[in-house]
Amino acid sequence: MLHPGAKLAGGPALASADPSSLPPSRQAQALDDLLLGINEWRNIQDVVRITFKAFHDVLRQQGESIRALERTVDTKAGRAEVSVALQQKANANEMAARMAEVRCRHAMPAKDS
């Protein structure tokens, strides 16, 4: 089984290596090693290797989803912006009073002098 100081074949120690910092080709090679049961993975049961691969896939997908969310958050309005916009909008009572005023003006004929 891999221990914290174990090294990937031709790569940095696992304890100090951030998998996301590895180039994609190196990540793919490490995943292939896991699935094929070679290098440090040769004595690991299939169910464990497959579980690690599934976990890796889920983590990658979640990372991509988080990055997409982070990109969209910047385009959303904050609470303060929403509050200011809501304070500037007309409420129902003001709107009803303005509509009544407009109706009265259009209902009265204009006086000619």
Image (spheres, rainbow, N blue to C red):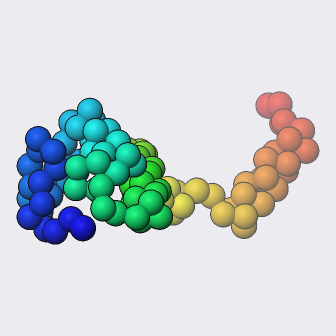
Residue 63: x, y in percent?
37, 52
**Image height of 65 relative to 51, above or below:** above
Residue 103 placement, left or right of 6: right
For the C terminus, the quadrant is: top right
Q: Residue furthest front?
A: 43
In terms of depth relative to the viewer, which is nearer, 12 or 6? 6
Residue 63 placement, left or right of 29: right
Q: Residue, x 86% and y 41% (percent of image)?
A: 106
Q: Is residue 42 visible?
A: yes
Residue 52 placement, left or right of 94: left
Q: Residue, x 29% and y 48% (percent of image)?
A: 38
Residue 10: x, y in percent?
11, 41
For the N terminus, the quadrant is: bottom left
Q: Is residue 69 visible?
A: no
Residue 44: x, y in percent?
34, 63
Residue 19 placement, left or right of 56: left
The quarter holding residue 79 reads bottom left
In terms of depth relative to the viewer, which is nearer, 16 or 85? 16
The quarter holding residue 18 reads bottom left
**Image height of 33 relative to 14, above or below:** above
Residue 11: x, y in percent?
11, 44
**Image height of 75 relative to 4, above or below:** above
Q: Residue, x 63% and y 58% (percent of image)?
A: 90
